[in-house]
Amino acid sequence: MTQSIDPSSQSNYKRQEDGLPDWQSMASAKSSPDQAANMLQASILFLRRFICHESLYGDSEGAKELLKVQDLLGSLESYKEEAFNQQLRDSYDFVCCYLELLYETQAPWDLCLEFERLVKILEAIQCMQQQAVLGVMGSLAQLNSYLKPHS
C-alpha cells in the first residue's frame, strides 16, 4: 500500500501539517452538478487528481497503472479492438486489487467509494463488450444511462 493512502503512515500526517496537498483533499474536491450527473466524467476527473497526487507523494508504479485506466476510459470508442479488450481486463483486475488494498488498510470511505465507482464503470464497459459480440451496438449514452443512479 502506498504511504500516501495508508492511514497509519506518519508521513501522511506530516504532509497535512506542512500544508501540502493530500489525497483526501483531492478525493473530496467538489465537482459541478453536470460532472456529478455523469459518473464517467467524475471518475476520470478523480483519477486525474489521484494519479497526480500518487505520482508526487505515493506509489509511482501504481500511478502508471491508474494512468492506463484513465486512458482506457478516455478511449471508449475503440472498445471493439483486441488491445482495448486486454487493457480492460488488466485495468479491471488492477482496480479490484487496489480496492481490496484500500479495504485492508481501512482507507477512508470516500476514497473506497471512488474506486468502487471505477469498478462499476469497468464492469459496465465489459457488459457493453459482451453485448457487442451479440450484435448490440453500445454507446456512451447507454453507458451513462446504465451508470446513472436510479431513484
Image: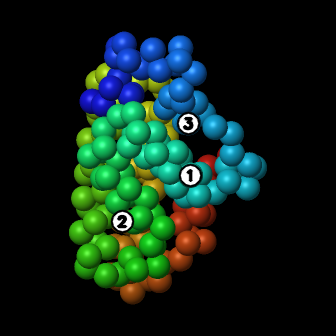
> Residue placed farthest to the bottom in the image?
135
Question: x, y percentage for residue 16?
Answer: 52, 19
Question: x, y percentage for residue 41?
Answer: 59, 58
The mark closer to the camera, 1 or 2, is: 1
Q: Given contact means CB atoms under 8 Å apart, are the residues at marks 1 and 2 in contact?
A: no
In this rendered view, identify the residue nearer to me: 28 or 100. Answer: 28
**Disc 1 element:** helix
Tell which circle, 1 or 2, labels the residue nearer the N-terminal end.
1
**Disc 3 element:** helix
Q: How far apart are marks 1 and 2 (CA)?
A: 21 Å
The amino acid on which the numbered mark 3 sits, given as a three-letter code, is: Met
Q: How far apart are marks 2 and 3 (CA)?
A: 28 Å
- The image quarter containing residue 91 is bottom left
111 relative to 49, above or below: above
9 relative to 35, above or below: above
Residue corresponding to mark 2? 126
Question: x, y percentage for residue 17?
Answer: 53, 14
Along the horizontal axis of the image, is 36 left or right of 90?
right
The quarter in which the N terminus is drawn is top left
**Disc 2 element:** helix
147 relative to 137, above or below: above
Q: Does the rendering let one see residue 116? A: no
Residue corresponding to mark 1? 45
Q: Given contact means CB atoms under 8 Å apart, are the residues at marks 2 and 3 in contact?
A: no
Residue at 35 percent of width and 34 percent of height: 58
The amino acid on which the numbered mark 2 sits, given as a three-letter code, is: Gln
Q: How crowded is mark 3: few (under 14 residues within 10 Å), some or many (20 or more)?
A: some
Q: Residue 26 carries which label?
A: 3
Q: Residue 59 carries which label?
A: none
Residue at 44 percent of width and 33 percent of height: 112
Q: Does the rendering let one see residue 86? A: yes
